[in-house]
Image: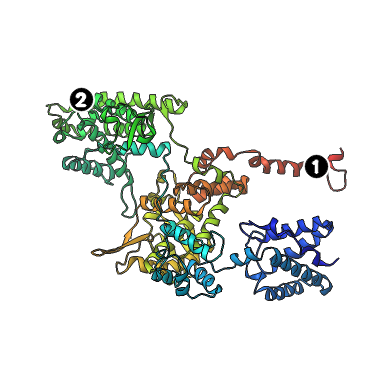
């Protein structure tokens, strides 16, 4: 049968193919054979195409490109050499070459326009210039053909020369340009990176709604006196050897490593700022969400934590505020509302969903209990704090007051813990499931591939060398952060403090290693070893390039060794090598995931831990939980508890296989009848 019969097809039917991949082309060829009653030939055609793709080192998921246009004859020669190397005879591979040529002819006659658009240069500027020149224009003559005032000549020229780039606000202009170039809408696709500064959609999830409401009614307070008291507390919690007469429980020490900030200290300080803010609020404020203890600011002291009623009122104050939410004023019918139920700018209206206790309540109680605990509590051991309350009190009386408050808080802690452990959703808020917004990724058979596909698109979008060096360096920095989270999904705090030569090292063999002392981790008390792992080899090239080409641009003359840094250059400002904090790094990842993962609203770095762990466990459930614990640098018990839903029949399948092999050895040796025949 001649291979030419597959060429003819209904072009009307083939219009609207979004992305012309090899898989699409092969599928359409096979459909054409079926329509012509030549279905028996499909196997031979598929074999020829499969070997051809293997020879030119591509796959069915890859887009069709130059290999079917100007590079076609060269690729045919590559294919022939590949077959000869496999010791395939000429009589076998020649008919396959004929089939491959028939596929090219099929594409030429049915996908010519799609292939033309798809084969254009990827970069926006080069693609625009190519289309202009193809129509016989110069940049200036094409500009003159456009509507007056649409875009300046200098802007168009700079776009073509890649000296500047369009942004989201230029999208309407680009749509008009596409019409004048006679190409389909979307042909001049902007790099997604250029859309990163677009106005982002405000996703008012319940969690963000709650945060917005809380931030719009601030109340935190902190004074110099409180800071002095806190520094004394911090010394008590961090000193390796305490002053004579002081005690500290074994688990009461706040640790850090390598000069990093003491993470627990920052968390406790925020709790104290909140408590002191509540204490300073008036007792009779019309707004119940800003009603507190009525204590004057100069009188604020850590000593107030011994006041049983005040601490209990604060816990209930937190519970009340946890139910506060906002909605747009446009969504609410005109009605008379109390002044405190409308935001100052009138754009938001408050409403109450009903407050509940939560993990924050438990965290406050844990820290209060630690400070008041008999014998080892910091406040318990410092009766001089009684003077801060304006009362004269003996050391014994002070300690008795600490014990009474401690006993009441301990009872509250046990009650709230019972609510949490029994799943009492009526009184305890368990918060949003962090895996909720990525559930569709976790449900995929290969979750990590979704992240890798996004990473590939990011690298394809890398700005050309003609772009502003600083902007290009920032873009590559963000890509590297995304890539490292895919391979080493540490908590974002570790990446914020990461330094070249200290935590990220290059060995003489070209490998890169990440290393941190055990004390640097949040779960350091449960870890048995430091973190010292080799970075995946595919990322070594990215790290080499970043260290040599882009990191020097970001640090300037600052000599900063931090891996993820920024530079601020303005009219009166020039700062290099500024370490990026956890919040900024999280924002970068949230923006990248929204941009490069189709249908995603964006998620933060912690989600990478769930995605990587799920992918590892799904790949091999028999050892996946152990490997996931290694990847996350966490206890295997923690991983098994977190991903218990993946312990399906697949997890037990290795046991079944082992049982079956043993069974067959006994019941079905090679010389006997099979088990099925028993």
Name the residue that disc number 2 marks.
Answer: 284
Residue 548 location (% of width, % of height): 42, 70
Q: Residue at x 22, y 31 (%)?
A: 279
- Residues at circles 2 and 1 in contact by the CB criterion of under 8 Å: no
Q: Is residue 600 among what the camera can see?
A: yes
Q: Position of residue 551 (x, y in %)?
A: 38, 66
Of residues 104 and 668, the one nearer the viewer is 104
Tell me if residue 346 comes above or below residue 137 in the rendering: above
Disc 2 vs disc 1: which is toward the camera?
2
Residue 169, position as x, y percentages in the image? 41, 57
**In the rendered view, does 367 fall on the left or right side of 157?**
left
| Residue under the point 16% across and 43% down | 224
**Mark 2–mark 1 distance (CA, rounded to whole Å):** 83 Å
Instruction: Please identify the quadrant where the N terminus is shown.
Output: bottom right
**Crowding near the residue tagged with mark 2, few <14, some 14–19, many ≥20 C-alpha atoms within 10 Å:** few
Callout 1: few (<14), some (14-19), or many (20+) C-alpha neighbours within 10 Å? few
Numbered mark located on residue 666 in the image: 1
């Amino acid at each position: 049968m001649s291979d030419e019969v597959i060429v003819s097809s209904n072009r009307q039917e083939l219009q609207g193919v979004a992305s012309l991949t090899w898989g699409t082309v092969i599928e359409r060829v096979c459909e054409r054979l079926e329509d012509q009653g030549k279905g028996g030939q499909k196997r031979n055609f598929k074999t020829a195409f499969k070997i051809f793709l293997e020879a030119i080192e591509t796959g069915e998921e890859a887009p069709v490109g130059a290999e079917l246009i100007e590079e076609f004859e060269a690729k045919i020669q590559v294919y022939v050499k590949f077959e000869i190397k496999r010791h395939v005879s000429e009589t076998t591979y020649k008919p396959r070459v004929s089939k491959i040529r028939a596929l090219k002819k099929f594409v030429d006659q049915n996908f010519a326009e799609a292939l033309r658009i798809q084969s254009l240069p990827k970069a926006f500027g080069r693609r625009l210039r190519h289309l202009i020149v193809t129509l016989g224009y110069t940049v200036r003559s094409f500009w003159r053909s456009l509507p007056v005032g649409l875009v300046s000549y200098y802007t168009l020229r700079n776009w073509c020369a890649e000296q500047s780039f369009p942004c989201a606000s230029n999208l309407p202009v680009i749509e008009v340009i596409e019409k004048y170039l006679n190409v389909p809408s979307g042909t001049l696709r902007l790099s997604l990176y250029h859309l990163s500064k677009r106005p982002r959609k405000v996703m008012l999830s319940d969690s963000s709604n709650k945060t917005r409401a809380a931030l719009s009614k601030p109340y935190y307070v902190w004074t110099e006196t409180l800071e002095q008291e806190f520094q004394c507390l911090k010394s008590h919690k961090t000193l390796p050897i305490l002053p004579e007469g002081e005690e500290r429980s074994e688990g009461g020490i706040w640790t850090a490593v390598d000069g990093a900030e003491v993470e627990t200290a920052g968390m406790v300080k925020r709790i104290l700022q909140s408590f002191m803010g509540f204490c300073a609020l008036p007792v009779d404020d019309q707004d119940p969400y800003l009603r507190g203890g009525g204590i004057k600011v100069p009188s604020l002291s850590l000593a107030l934590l011994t006041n049983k009623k005040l601490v209990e009122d604060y816990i209930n104050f937190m519970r009340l505020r946890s139910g506060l939410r906002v909605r747009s004023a446009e969504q609410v019918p005109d009605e008379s509302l109390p002044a405190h139920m409308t935001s100052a700018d009138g754009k938001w209206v408050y409403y109450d969903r009903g407050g509940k206790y939560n993990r924050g309540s438990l965290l406050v109680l844990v820290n209060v209990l630690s400070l008041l605990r008999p014998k080892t509590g910091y406040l318990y051991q410092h009766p001089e704090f009684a003077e801060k309350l304006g009362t004269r009190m003996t050391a014994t009386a002070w300690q008795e007051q600490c014990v009474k408050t401690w006993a009441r808080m301990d009872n509250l802690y046990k009650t709230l813990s019972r609510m949490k452990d029994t799943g009492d959703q009526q009184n305890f808020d368990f918060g949003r499931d962090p895996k909720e917004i990525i559930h569709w990724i976790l449900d995929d058979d290969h979750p990590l591939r979704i992240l890798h596909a996004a990473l590939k698109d990011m690298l394809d979008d890398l700005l050309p060398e003609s772009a502003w060096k600083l902007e290009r360096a920032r873009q590559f920095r963000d890509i590297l952060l995304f890539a490292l989270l895919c391979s080493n999904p540490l908590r974002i705090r570790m990446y914020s403090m990461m330094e070249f030569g200290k935590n990220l090292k290059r060995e003489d063999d070209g490998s890169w290693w990440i290393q941190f002392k055990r004390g640097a981790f949040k779960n350091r008390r449960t870890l048995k070893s430091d973190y010292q792992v080799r970075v995946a080899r595919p990322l070594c090239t990215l790290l080499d390039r970043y260290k040599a080409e882009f990191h020097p641009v970001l640090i300037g003359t600052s000599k900063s060794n931090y891996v993820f840094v920024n530079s601020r250059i303005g009219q009166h400002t020039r700062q290099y090598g500024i370490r990026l904090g956890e919040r900024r790094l999280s924002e970068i990842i949230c923006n990248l995931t929204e941009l490069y993962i189709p249908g995603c609203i964006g998620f933060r770095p912690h989600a990478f831990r769930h995605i990587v762990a799920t992918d590892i466990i799904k790949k091999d459930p028999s050892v996946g939980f152990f490997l996931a614990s290694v990847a996350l640098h966490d206890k295997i018990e923690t991983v098994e508890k977190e991903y218990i839903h993946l312990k399906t029949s697949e997890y037990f399948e290795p046991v079944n296989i082992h049982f079956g092999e043993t069974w067959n050895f006994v019941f079905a040796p090679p010389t006997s009848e099979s088990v099925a025949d028993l």
